[in-house]
């Protein structure tokens, strides 16, 4: 019998993180399968963004482990996590306003150690890295319908396109690494109307398939979550409330009581 490889791309076990007296994440365990999109939902303050910050090495867990493709990421630093294959977007827009859209997507791709050092000397290696970054960035932007914006300043884009540009940047970052690719999206549809949200859902589905990445999606737009996610994890007060298919989650009494039932009067959870 051969030893079984890891069945899940991401394995989170007993993950906990406190801030002073606040237990932001508490003994949380879940798996993310390869391919597809895992939704991470729950009320404000449930601990969703903290989970992303723990996975990406921004915060150290107080307890628990995080494995990507069987490799322990628990104590890795953010740049090591990126190198291991995990890229993300942030809940609030973080674009460089005075750079073009293409530069916004390319810059993080070039900010890796070797390239940054060699940039000073413009070695052939660096020129090669730049070309690769540019090609990857343009391919992703084209796929997402952002090709026309490449040479515009990021600050001149309407809000919806700025959010898309951030996803393009995370995707491009993920594509440049070898091995597994996990892209974490933190409320990409925040502040979007129905039509924009629907269109974003189509873009997310298309890019996930076209570039064969695995995604995790934090969102309060529940229709978007139900439409694009293959599985859903529901958090409440730092803990796992439920995990299952969109269909199962939609009809789960505890999820309805803790979260979905309130959506009518508080659509964006704000
Ligand atoms: N750096 C920090 N310092 C202190 N408390 C924090 C910190 N980060 C998060 N928290 C607290 O941890 C809890 C979980 O916050 P988190 O941002 O993860 O929630 P969330 O589920 O993403 O909420 P939202 O849907 O509003 O974005 C909250 O009580 C929050 O105030
Ligand atoms: Mg959050």
Image (cartoon, rainbow, N blue to C red):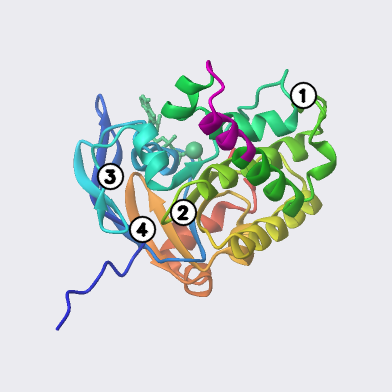
User: Magenta stretch mostly in which secondary structure?
Assistant: helix
Q: Quadrant of residue 164?
A: top right
How far from the left and from the top, in percent, is residue 78? 37, 33
Classify mark 4: helix, strand or loop: strand
Residue occupying the point 61% across, 39% down: 133
Classify mark 2: helix, strand or loop: loop
How far from the left and from the top, in percent, is residue 241? 36, 58
Classify mark 1: helix, strand or loop: helix
Residue 195's place in the image compared with 74, above or below, is below
Q: Specify few, some or many for label 3: CA neighbours under 10 Å numbering under 14, 14-19, or 20 or more.
A: many
**Which label's residue is closer to the chain start, 4 or 2?**
2
Q: Quadrant of residue 170?
A: top right
How far from the left and from the top, in percent, is residue 6? 27, 66
Please tell me whether mark 4 or mark 1 is closer to you in this view.
1
Q: Check residue 261 for magenta coloring.
A: no
Residue 73: numbered disc: 3
Residue 232's place in the image compared with 266, above or below, is below
- State the residue lying farthest toward the front: 124
Quadrant the N terminus occupies: bottom left
Q: Which residue is mark 2?
A: 181
Residue occupying the point 71% across, 56% down: 203
């Amino acid at each position: 019998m051969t030893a079984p490889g890891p069945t899940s791309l991401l394995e989170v076990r007993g993950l906990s993180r406190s801030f002073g007296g606040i237990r932001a994440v508490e003994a949380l365990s879940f798996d993310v399968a390869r391919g597809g999109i895992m939704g991470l939902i729950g009320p404000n303050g449930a601990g969703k963004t903290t989970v992303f910050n723990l996975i990406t090495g921004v915060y150290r867990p107080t307890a628990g482990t995080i494995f990507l493709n069987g490799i322990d990421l628990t104590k890795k630093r953010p740049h090591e996590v990126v190198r291991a294959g995990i890229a993300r977007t942030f809940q609030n827009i973080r674009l460089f306003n005075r750079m073009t859209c293409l530069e916004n997507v390319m810059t993080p791709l070039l900010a890796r150690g070797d390239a940054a050092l060699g940039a000073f000397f413009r070695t052939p290696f660096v020129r090669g890295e730049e070309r690769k970054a540019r090609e990857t960035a343009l391919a992703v932007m084209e796929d997402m319908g952002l090709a026309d914006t490449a040479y515009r300043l990021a600050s001149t884009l309407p809000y919806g396109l700025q959010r898309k540009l951030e996803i393009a940047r995370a995707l491009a970052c993920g594509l440049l690494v070898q091995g597994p690719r996990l892209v974490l999206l933190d409320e990409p549809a925040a502040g979007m109307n129905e039509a924009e949200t629907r269109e974003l859902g189509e873009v997310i589905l298309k890019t996930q398939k076209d570039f064969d990445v695995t995604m995790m999606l934090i969102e309060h737009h529940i229709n978007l979550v139900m439409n694009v996610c293959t599985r859903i994890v529901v958090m409440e007060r730092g803990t796992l409330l439920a995990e299952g298919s969109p269909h199962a989650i939609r009809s789960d009494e505890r999820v309805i009581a803790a979260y979905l039932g309130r959506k009518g009067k508080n659509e964006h959870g704000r």
